[in-house]
Image (cartoon, rainbow, N blue to C red):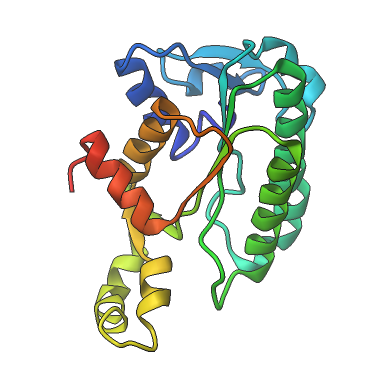
Amino acid sequence: MTGGTGYIGRPLIVALAAEQYPVYALVRKGSEAKLPAAAISVVGDALDDATYAHAIPSGATLVHLVGTPHPSPAKARQFREVDLVSVRAAVDAAMHAGVRHFVYLSVAHPAPVMAAYIAVRQAGEALVGASGMAATFVRPWYVLGPGHRWPLAVLPAYWLMARLPATRDAATRLGLVTLEEIVAALVHTIEHPPQELRVLNVPDIRAAAVVSGSPE
């Protein structure tokens, strides 16, 4: 796993460890203590596949979660220099290691905002897709959880949009999911790898979370 010290990575490691999965987590030197105790730390640089490809077990699932925290339109340069470079490195590392399943945390699209962020995630999807690996693209729009709750203020607008034919599709595609739901959906997709390419949009994330037993 890359991004194991982050907002989604830490609870995902805990959830996978609870299911008895060994989790190798990439971490920068000096940040090992930020990983949950259940993780097996791999010291390396997410922007340089040569620093960690050797540590990926053959036939493993690679979950790529690296991303600029709290994305905003002002962070377009970081998206290109961190998010895009890291997924390119992860694809190269996965190909070198003979990864069985590549899970990429992408973003819901199209959308009327965050064009630079969406463009980089689409480019990341293209890189993964071109590799020929079995892969899952997980596309949330916003993940509600500790420190990530401001969209609750716009829930009435979502409620209205979901009931109007002209905006129903956008409200569904750009719906909000919880941290518990995204973690449960990721566990489910890791446990049930595809043969080729699979995409989980917001309704699919919610459905996978229910199957996996996530609380509502």
Q: Is residue 153 left or right of residue 67?
A: left
Residue at 32% in and 82% down: 161
Residue 53 placement: quadrant: top right
Q: Is residue 30 left or right of residue 206?
A: right
Q: Is residue 168 above or below residue 79?
A: below
Residue at 42% in and 67% down: 173
Q: Is residue 206 above or below residue 27?
A: below
How many numbered marks appear?
Answer: 0
Q: Is residue 116 above or below residue 206?
A: below
Q: Is residue 181 left or right of residue 64?
A: left
Residue 93 % position (x, y): 74, 24
Residue 62 placement: quadrant: top right
Residue 108 % position (x, y): 51, 61
Tell me the quarter of the image containing the N terminus: top right
Residue 36 % position (x, y): 42, 20
Q: Is residue 199 above or below residue 175?
A: above
Can residue 174 be seen from the camera position used here?
no
Q: Nearer the viewer, residue 9 or 190?
A: 190
Q: Nearer the viewer, residue 201 or 16?
A: 201
Residue at 41% in and 36% down: 186
Can residue 206 be seen from the camera position used here?
yes
Residue at 45% in and 11% down: 22
Residue 198 % position (x, y): 52, 44
Determine the residue located farthest toward the front in the rendered image: 195
